Image (cartoon, helix red, strand yellow):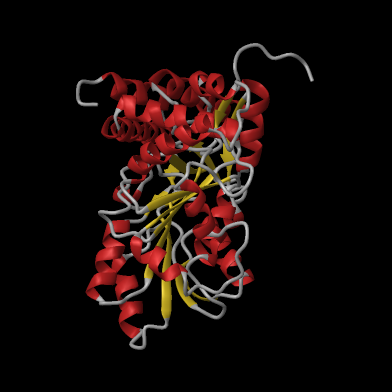
Amino acid sequence: MNFRSGRHFLQLPGPTNVPDRVLRAMDRATIDHRGAEFAEMTGQLLSSLNRVFGGAEHVFIFPSSATGAWEAAMVNTLSPGDRVLMFDHGFFANNWRMVAERLGVTVDFVAGDWRCAVAPSMVEAKLAEDQNHQYRAVMIVHNETSTGVVTDVAGIREAMNRAQHPALLLVDTVSSLASMEYEHRAWGVDVTVSGSQKGLMLPPGLSFNAVSQKALDGNAQATLPQSYWRWDAIREFNERGFFPYTPATNLLYGLLEAVTMLHEEGLPRVFARHARLAEATRRAVKTWGLEIFAREPAERSQTVTTVFVPDGLDADTLRRVILERFDMSLGSGLGALKGKVFRVGHLGDFNDLMLAGTLSGIEMGLQASGVRAAGSGVTAALEFLASEES
């Protein structure tokens, strides 16, 4: 491979760019994970991380991808044959369903339109039909990374309350945590699932369960096989500042630094920054004459924008042109969307100039691929970013 000057633009919706501060924090010697220094770090980390989730009874950290945290959420709350309610609203919702079925859970998977969020009214109607309360859990993806569509989690909990249903609420926040408003406790979530490689600005390798007291209370009755993922074992060790296995110590160094950075900026400012960059991206897409996949403006993500390519153009061909010509990686279409869309990640350690470069790469890639844009999306985005209103 020939040498390429400059820095690669990693504009996937995860993994995201890792800040230099986080890289430096991880670049230190591993310490004794049964020593006093490690215990002090664990206590500080769990407290600071809990604030990012919006308050939970406990946050469990696993050395795994977020798929492992999905499994952990289920084996600690469910038993073989338990029924759960899930909705077909994207590629990752389908993946979560697959994990549940492999574990022996019975899934009622409600068909949906990937271009729209899960409607609270639909949840309420399904739960109202369940007079015998057979559903043990409702499982939702907050921000569907494949589609760029956001579901109203607080509205889902309100619907569950109106139906007076005792089901647990399990929520995937892999591409929304630390980038979009999320309140585990205030929104009545029982288990929040997330990963390290997106809004938390780390490499892949850590995942999380933030849990409510209700979920912890039900843990003793869950009989799906558990070993590595057991909450009770991790909680017991966490109380002393440790983990029941060898932890990913250097990733934990990075996590503590990343959470410190988030609190230094202030979470409301973090969320506002993401909302502003997302709006600039959407204005660019509209000016190019392309169509955003998420149909409803109010349901459009602040971390990822999924974009249809024009008829006759393969999205993977466009992505390849952009990678080869301009050294920038964009997200591919997943599942049924393969070849039809590309995805722009605008989350994590990301600012105005980085977005300007990203949009410039897309605009040049469209031109190089023979697409006549209706106008300059870059100009439209920059005008928005520079305006007093933004």
Image vertical order of residue 91 relative to residue 128, above or below = above
Tally of marks: 0
Q: Position of residue 198 (x, y in %)?
A: 49, 38
Image vertical order of residue 196 relative to residue 260, above or below = below
Q: Residue furthest left?
A: 389
Image quadrant where residue 378 sits: top left
Quarter holding the C terminus? top left
Q: Position of residue 72 (x, y in %)?
A: 54, 59
| Residue beneath the point at 32% across and 24% down | 264
Q: Position of residue 146 (x, y in %)?
A: 51, 50
| Foreground of the two, 20 or 344 | 20
Q: Is residue 94 visible?
A: yes
Q: Is residue 289 visible?
A: no
| Foreground of the two, 62 or 194 | 62
Quarter holding the N terminus? top right
| Residue beneath the point at 48% across and 41% down | 241
Position of 254 with respect to 267 (left or right) is: right
Image vertical order of residue 333 relative to residue 87, above or below = above
